[in-house]
Amino acid sequence: MEDKGSLLIRGGTVVTATARLRADVLVRSGRIDAVGPDLGIDEADVDRVIDAAGCWVMPGGIDTHTHLAHPIGRLGVTTADDFYTGTVAGAFGGVTTIIDFGLQEQGGTLTDARDHRFGVIDPDAIIDFGFHLIVTDVNEGVLAEMGDLIRSGFPSFKVYMTYGDKKIGDDDLILLLEVAGEHGGLIYAHCENDCAVTHLIERHLAEGKTGPAYHATSRPPAVEAEATNRAIMLAELAGAPICIAHVTSSGAARHVADARARGVAVAAETCPQYLVLDSSVYDPGAGCEVAKFVCSPPMREHSHVDALWDALADGSIQQVSSDHAPFRYEGQKTGGCDNFTQIPNGLPGIETRLPIVFTEGVASGRLTPERFVELTATAPARLFGLTEKGRIEPGADADLIVVDPEREVEITADVLHSDVDYSPYEGMRLKGFPTWTISRGDVIIDNGVLTAERGRGRQVERIPIDPANLP
């Protein structure tokens, strides 16, 4: 692996969130030192030169929604990727920073959740990391510790408006919003109406609709749209910023756009699965194979796919994250073949996130290259307080990817690096995989070869969130 010496990336097209230009990039001591056309650097004066002719040089991807080594207590399973296999997969897909999650146990503190998560991540990650703290038990002690956590680099808090013992009610949500807003924190919300979801699940099971295909009809678009609107309304009342996780439907996207138009500090993400897959994957005739596509919220009818692309293009949705929740089909997903409530929810996607958005967005003409960089690197950094990431400027961390825009890869589980036995994108041909992935000046993927050492990743620096700076 390259040491923290000097690196010259020569002759590529540098793409940022605002511009494209033919330029060299000089890296020294893990940071970007200079960017410009023909820097005139003698190759003998640097430790390594990468010839980027014909390639695009872009900021490394920032994936702010991953679930690595994440337990699902009620099912007794844990996601298949730990922080080594998951970050290796991310690096092959051009990801140089992740923000994962630390789960508060019932009766425990957020500080306990933070400290426990450090012990899991530190030995394994090959790229830089942070994590959101998942709040499941709101009490005076939790509210009191939020300010110190925000100031010490943990400014974002995940909440679930559904999901059993993780769920918090509106009364607790508005308290969290008020405290987060006071101290520079950000609430990051999974929005589904729990009452409606619970009712529909019970009705499906009572009617004998138990197979994996019925997962989708138990969580229709209306339950997402209603909860999204409610969460935004509570944030507006509290005067606090909020980020809506994994928007899947036109209704939820419309609520975000309407709130932003009236000045509410709300941001939103969507995920690649909702941009290329639709509800046709939930074919009852496919039997247990449908379990591969069980995630929450589920995929929607194709009209919603088109609406999400429109929202990405017009700025209503500000980032694309993977929601990488990798469960194996055999032995994990198949445990719910006869009862969809027993299928662990989630899809693998950390490695294919950038290529899907590149292929279906940039190569298809839906997005400009600059908007691609904004959605996958620059906006996530701004939204979650990563001051050293997501840009190609002198002084920033040298987190970079070099991509041949014409290179194409056919997706199979075997060509990917996640510890999962399938891909939901099997057979798709994708562009946008990096030839080189560079993290803080280290070449960690070198023309298809992993060169990073286990555990080289560091906790990323994060600052409190200013609502005025939301993308």
Image: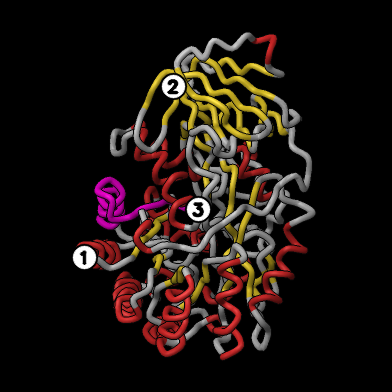
Of 309 and 269, which appears nearest the observer? 269
Mark 3 and mark 2: Cα distance apart in space: 26 Å
State yes or no: discs 3 and 2 in contact (Cβ < 8 Å).
no
The image's mark for residue 13 is: 2
Residue 86 point in image, percent of width and height: 66, 50
- Marker disc for residue 258: 1
Residue nearest the viewer, comparing 334 with 395 = 395
| Quarter of the view holding residue 190 | bottom left
Give me the residue at 30% from left, 48% from top: 309
Q: What kind of residue is marked 1?
A: Asp
**SS at mark 2 in the image:** strand
Residue 238 screen position, x and y as percent: 35, 80
Q: Amino acid at mark 3?
A: Ser
The numbered dot on residue 322 is 3
Q: Quadrant of residue 373?
A: top left
Q: Is residue 204 left or right of residue 251?
A: right
Mark number, residue 22 = none
Label 3: state its secondary structure: loop
Question: Between disc 3 and disc 1, whose residue precedes?
Answer: 1
Residue 146 horizontal side relative to residue 238, left or right = right
Q: Nearer the viewer, residue 64 or 331?
A: 64
Is 71 situated left or right of 379 in this image?
right
Under mark 2, the amino acid is Thr
- The answer to whether any part of residue 95 appears in the image is yes
* Mark 2 crowdedness (10 Å alpha carbons): few <14, some 14-19, many ≥20: many
Q: What's the magenta bit mostly, secondary-structure-wise? A: helix
